[in-house]
Amino acid sequence: MNTLQLYLDETGERISAFAERIGRSPSTLTRALSGARNPSVDLALDVERGTGGRVTASEFISICLQSKRKLAA
């Protein structure tokens, strides 16, 4: 399980609510997490700020890249 999902599970926040709280559309966040969209540095920094640093920008990008690799395999 990735660190963002752990954060969401621990806080009880839905991914759609989290996305809206950080000023992003839910589809932008879910597409990045699924590997269907390349994450921007700004999105990764928004995730880091939104989680209070519990999910770092580099962790978020790594999560997205792992999903992208799975799609390409």
Image (cartoon, grey):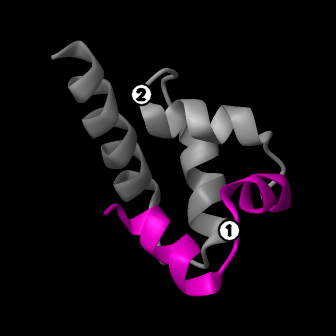
Which residue is pictured at 39% across the width and 39% down the height? 64
**Residue drawn where x is 80% and y is 39% of the image:** 25
Q: Position of residue 30 (x, y in %)?
A: 59, 39
Q: In terms of depth relative to the viewer, which is nearer, 8 or 37?
A: 8
| Quadrant in which the N terminus appears | bottom left
| Above-or-below relation of 22 to 72 | below
Q: Which residues are magenta?
A: 1-21
Q: Which mark is residue 68?
A: none
In this rendering, the answer to whether 61 lies above or below 67 is below
Mark 2 vs mark 1, foreground winner is: 2
Q: Which mark is residue 50?
A: 1
Predominant SS of the magenta segment: helix
Circle nearer the N terminus (2, 1): 2
29 sits to left or right of 70: right
- Image position of 69 with respect to 5: above or below: above
In the image, farthest residue toward the top: 72
Say which amino acid is labelled 2. Answer: Gly
Q: Position of residue 23 (x, y in %)?
A: 84, 50
Q: Secondary structure at mark 1?
A: helix
Type of amino acid under label 1:
Gly
Label 2: how many Cα within 10 Å (few below 14, some 14–19, many 20+)? some
Question: Which residue is farthest left?
Answer: 73
In the rendered structure, find residue 35 and report the number of the disc placed on it. Answer: 2
- Indicate yes or no whether the magenta region holds residue 3: yes
Question: Is 9 contained in the magenta span?
Answer: yes
**How far apart are the alpha carbons under marks 2 and 1?**
20 Å
SS class, disc 2: loop
